[in-house]
Image: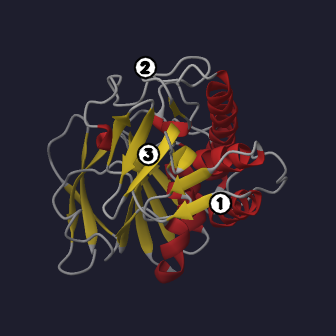
Amino acid sequence: MHKDFDIIVAGGGIAGLTAALTAARLGRRVQVLTGDVLGGHLLSIEKIEGFPGFADGVAGYELCPITQGQAAEAGAGFEMTEVTGLQADGAGWIAATAAENYAAWAVIIATGTSLAELGIPGEAELRGHGVSHCASCDAPLLMDKVVAVVGGGDSAAQEALTLAGAASRVVILCREDALSAKAVYRTRIEAQPNIEVRYRTLAGKILGDGVVTGIATRGIDNEALVELACEGVFVYIGHQPNSQFLNGLLDLDEDRRIPVDLDLRTEAAGIFAAGTVRAGSAGQAASSAGDGTAAAINADAYLDSGIWR
């Protein structure tokens, strides 16, 4: 039975790109269905630190195109289209998209995650008009302005530090008693004079008519809203796995991530998962890149084994 490709990679983030690079170098016919944006949410990160080979860090919008170029040079194909479903096709799989279907013997799911939303009034209405998930994109527009960052993890800390280079004042709204970001980021925040952290604080409503003019907050133990005047609200409260397209094909864990074994195999023969969409991911760019490499090697071994015939 003919298949268009040996391996389809669903997702164009660092896990998907390294999977494509590795599989192509192993001589496999590889097609990457990247989704709407090549690079995933790494594109919005101004400086990825701790990634091997980049002593001073690397911007996501530089790292991902470099890796994509390597994969393309090795022979991988790319389409900027999103996988909307997977279905069995004999011993292989069909990946459906809005435009057409792609058939392969194996699939590597590397669809990553999307930034979670607050779900509060004003957020959807003012997205793109002061509500943002990308500090490096919007910091130049907020020179000498007051901005709020909602969240307490690595992403919130990194983006607050990026914004501090442009904004007059950055206020981090953290619902916990302490930031959960890595110590290196906490130390930098403490040393940054124009960053203030408000602990045990929740975002209640984003204010503005057409553009952001402020955010109403409240304490964990206090229902009274307090308004903070600001011109930008940046939301980093965690990530949601992009697994909705599976539509019950695979069992997911309680966080809707994909369970895998030590070889990154899912419960379905011929389907592998890599990067932050899988259960147990370390959530780092470097670990996702490693996942992509491992998934491709294991998919190659699966195809070599002949057990799928």
Give the spatial CA distance, label 2 vs label 1.
Answer: 29 Å
Q: Is residue 132 left or right of residue 49?
A: left
Q: Are marks 2 and 3 in contact (CB under 8 Å)?
A: no
Residue that appears at 62% across and 21% down: 263
Label 2 vs 1, first from the N-terminus: 1
Q: Secondary structure at mark 3?
A: strand
Where is residue 305? Give x, y as percent. Answer: 65, 21
Residue that appears at 28% across and 45% down: 202
Crowd class of label 1 (few under 14; some 14 to 19; many from 20; radius 10 Å): many
Where is residue 145? Give x, y as percent. Answer: 45, 77
Label 2 vs 3, first from the N-terminus: 3
> Which three-letter amino acid code belongs to the residue tagged 2?
Glu
> Which three-letter amino acid code belongs to the residue tagged 1?
Cys
Q: Which mark is residue 64?
A: 1
Q: Is residue 91 left or right of residue 129?
A: right
Camera sees residue 274: yes
Q: Which mark is residue 267?
A: 2
Where is residue 122? Give x, y as percent. Answer: 19, 65
Along the viewing direction, whichever of 231 and 259 lies nearer the viewer: 259
The residue wearing badge 3 is 113
